[in-house]
Image (cartoon, helix red, strand yellow):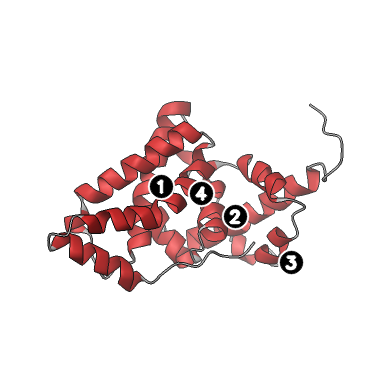
Amino acid sequence: MMAPSYSTHAEDVAFVERYRNGDKTAFKSLLDKHLGSVYAFVFQLTRDRAAAEDIAQETFIKAWRHLGRYDVARPFRTWLFAIAKNTAYDWLKKKRSIPFSAFVDVADGGIPFENIPDPEPLPTEFLMRADASAELAEVIRQLPEKYRSLIALVYHEGFSLHEAAEVLGESYNTVKSRHQRGILELRKHLKNAPKTGENRTI
């Protein structure tokens, strides 16, 4: 799975500055540029198309309202996806009464996860071996939200772990550990999932 390519942060800043200087069409340019990826991200979290549409729309309304407070030194996509993540999490908590622990990792006081040997292929190589994107999407859907959001950010939207940590509002070490746990969960689900052409049992 290849990371998508995006135009530069400088282009986003240029649109923001144009909007702040009175060019109201500049915000529509930002919306047109990022709406698809924001929708795809929140759909990965909600698995509900109608909800994803509403959340994506609400994300841009919030971004528009707070654009005056946006720090142009910070990547616009990171700032925007943080808004999308918070909006999606609010929806999930209201919809499913999901406990806070579903979104964060709770330290168990054991051996640091980073010290556990992991001889499996690199995550990108592993994901590229999936039989079909539809099957991979179904497996990702079964993961807890805390893993699904991170995998969506890194493998669907092309964020680095450092950028994903900023979007999620958590430390890099926490996100790195969660990434490793999420990949192991993904491997476990894929190992147990029927391969293409196999009969599925209900």
Q: Earlier in the sequence, mark 1 or mark 2?
A: 1
Q: Earlier in the sequence, mark 4 or mark 2?
A: 2
Q: Secondary structure at mark 2?
A: loop
Q: Residue at x 40, y 28 (%)?
A: 94
Query: CA gap, disc 1 to disc 2?
Result: 29 Å
* Circle 4: residue type: Ser
Dot 4 crowding, Cα within 10 Å, few <14, some 14–19, many 20+: many
Is 113 placed left or right of 22 in the picture?
Answer: right
The answer to whether the residues at label 4 and label 1 have Cβ atoms under 8 Å apart is yes
Q: Secondary structure at mark 3?
A: loop
Q: Earlier in the sequence, mark 4 or mark 1?
A: 1
Which residue in the protein does label 3 denote? 121
The answer to whether the residues at label 4 and label 2 have Cβ atoms under 8 Å apart is no
Q: Secondary structure at mark 1?
A: helix
Which residue in the protein does label 1 denote? 85
* Circle 2: residue type: Gly
Q: Secondary structure at mark 4?
A: helix
Query: CA gap, disc 4 to disc 2?
Result: 25 Å
Residue 194: give its label.
none
Relative to residue 120, is residue 47 depicted above or below? Answer: above
Rendered-image quadrant of the N terminus: bottom right
Instruction: Name which quarter of the figure residue 162 lies in.
Output: bottom left
Residue 149: give its label.
4
* Circle 3: residue type: Pro
Dot 2 crowding, Cα within 10 Å, few <14, some 14–19, many 20+: few
